[in-house]
Image (cartoon, rainbow, N blue to C red):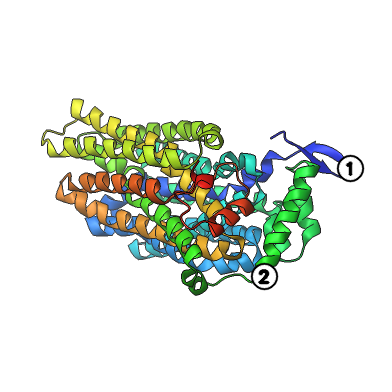
Amino acid sequence: MTQPTRGAGTIRPVRASTYFFGALGGLLFGYDLGVVAGALLFITPQLGLSHLQTGMVTSSLLVGAMIGALGCGRITDRVGRRTVVLGAAVLFGLGAIGAALAPNLFWILAFRLIMGLAVGTASVTVPVYLSEISPASRRGSLSGLNQLMISSGILVAYLVNLALAPAQAWRWMFGLAAIPAVLMLIGGYFQPESPRWLIKKGREAEARAVLARSRTPEQLDAEIAEIVRINESEQQQMRLGAMIRDPRLRRVLLIGSGLALLQQVVGVNTVIYYAPTILKSIGFTSGAAILANAGLGGLTVVVTIIMLTMVDRVGRRRPLILGAIGMCAAMVLLAALFYSGGLTHGTAGWLAITGLALFKICFSLSWGGLVWIMLGELFPLRARGTAMGVATFFNWAGNFAVGLLFPVLLGVGTGLVFVIFAVLCLVSSGFALAFVPETKGKSLEQIERDLGHTANPATAVDLVG
């Protein structure tokens, strides 16, 4: 990060650590999403779990995430983004250690629920925080660091699974999640607070010091003035009921919630949670399935980096439309292989890996990172915490439904689930085409003005162009 900024009478570069540690919550998110994929291969036989109980191990974290996402919005607006992130790090560390030491299924579910509270809280707060500290011209790539951290966390989890698979050490797989939690706690302690939250609380001098790290003097003065002007017109944080009663805000809330829900129900979690299970069902050994899954995780990180280099040039809306079409094609391939009746470890098996890889590429270039970027951009300051909490609740609700039900459907041995995901991918493409605005290159305050004064933001020239 080398953009010149003003501070103490001099020009200095912005610290990359500000964005790195700001996004570290995504690493926790990604690690726990990924680690369960390998752990399930060993928990299931050791504890004699049914298909439904296997789904419960996955979805217990997601229940906690739903609660954390829905409940943290007003807390975030009251005490600040940074404080909430620190609390999430503590909760996650305690949950990880507890899950590793759990004596039976009940305590595994209980501690994963606690971890879920932390993950849900971080998934609301981190995108908002990154969007609020990033310059408009680079907000896409900097906010997208959250998705890079999620992808990196998933890859780290896959590598941990690969290393510990020979020993079937699923407890260590869970327990090692405490390490990124500690890093997040230490790094978050030295992070600045969100400048927009500081101004909302009347602490303009502190907000100016934070923004000075990544803005020129001219940009700094203009942005402070714009934030203050917007804040003065919106003195009170809106409750959910007030948002629903306002037609313009209701529309933005529906767009954000729709993006968040569709991101999960297009089938990404079948790849994250159950790729090793799918590959093992067609003849791969546990070790080979985990190795292939690690390769898919590495591919995701590479593609996410490519997305970050492009997002501020190509925008958000068009990749969402085209990416969903590519994901649909991948799900059609997987459905055809399962319906073929001859799915064995051979040509068809490698075609399955191709389908999984194609899905991950298309998802990582579009719905994987762009949804989190847009959720940090769409909502007005007076409703940002509450609206982000609602949207993220729908994200985790979709995640929960897929995590709980997919093992049951997989046990039936049908490709119908992939057909359903293919249809949902097409629905997602149509949703982006019809409703999603373009936010590339606009300040958060400009996006707020445009959405607030445009009757149909999805088709307005100033937003979609």
Residue at the image point whose x is 26% and y is 47% from the top: 421
Q: Secondary structure at mark 2?
A: loop
Q: Residue at x 18, y 35 (%)?
A: 337
Q: Residue at x 55, y 42 (%)?
A: 440
Q: Is residue 53 above or below residue 344?
A: below
Task: Using a 10 Å C-alpha cutoff, classify the residue at mark 2 as few (fewer than 14 neighbours), some (14 to 19) or many (20 or more).
Answer: few
Query: Is residue 465 or residue 427 the one in the foreground?
Result: 465
Q: Residue furthest left?
A: 341
Q: Which mark is residue 24?
A: none
Name the one closer to the observer, 118 or 161: 118
Q: Which x, y percent locates residue 106?
A: 35, 65
Q: Is residue 279 left or right of residue 25?
A: left
Q: Amino acid at mark 2?
A: Gln
Residue 101 makes an appearance in the image: no
On the image, numbered disc 1 is attached to which residue? Answer: 9
Q: CA distance from mark 2 to mark 1?
A: 33 Å
**Horizontal relation, residue 26 to residue 221: left or right:** left
Q: Nearer the viewer, mark 2 or mark 1?
A: 2
Q: Position of residue 19 (x, y in %)?
A: 64, 44
Q: For the view shown, which residue lies furthest in the top direction?
A: 347
Q: Which residue is mark 2?
A: 235
The image quadrant where one finds the N terminus is top right
Q: Is residue 118 above or below residue 37?
A: below
Q: Tag 1, which secondary structure?
A: loop
Q: Sequence order check: which comes first, mark 2 or mark 1?
A: 1
Nearest the viewer among 281 and 167 is 281
